[in-house]
Amino acid sequence: MLKEVFHLDAYPKSWEDFCNTWLRGKGPFPIRLIIFIFSGFAWALWTVRNKMAINKAFPRAPTDIIYIALSLLQKWSAKLKEKD
């Protein structure tokens, strides 16, 4: 998905590759942006996991998690500094 959306020639093909390149600032995007997006998706996964474990509420589709993450990122973006 990342390759198609951002027209990337190189992209991480595994979790290890992602951690060793993009999370260390060696990817095509600024590290602050990567951490921001990663945090949004990690928080979305955590909240969905809690709803599944505690409320027995399961997402209808995997894309629901993407929508939750994007919603969080939109809310958080209002808190970013101008340079970010």
Image (spheres, rainbow, N blue to C red):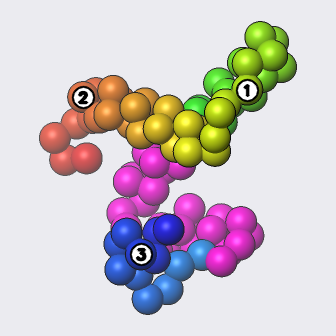
Most foreground residue, 18 or 58: 58
Can residue 45 be seen here?
yes
Residue drawn at x 56%, y 37% as measured from the top left:
64
Q: Residue 57: x and y, percent?
A: 73, 18
Query: In terms of secondary structure, what is the magenta stretch mainly?
Result: helix
74 with respect to 55 (left or right): left
Write the start and end of the magenta stretch as one range: 13-40
Q: Earlier in the sequence, mark 2 or mark 1?
A: 1
Most foreground residue, 47 or 55: 55
Q: Secondary structure at mark 2?
A: loop
Residue 4: numbered disc: 3
Q: CA distance from mark 2 to mark 1?
A: 29 Å
Residue drawn at x 22%, y 36% as measured from the top left:
81
In this view, 79 is above or below 66: above
Which residue position holds label 1?
58
Which residue position holds label 2?
78
Q: Judge the density around disc 3: few (<14), some (14-19), many (≥20) Cα neighbours within 10 Å.
A: few
64 with respect to 45 (left or right): left
Q: Judge the density around disc 1: few (<14), some (14-19), many (≥20) Cα neighbours within 10 Å.
A: some
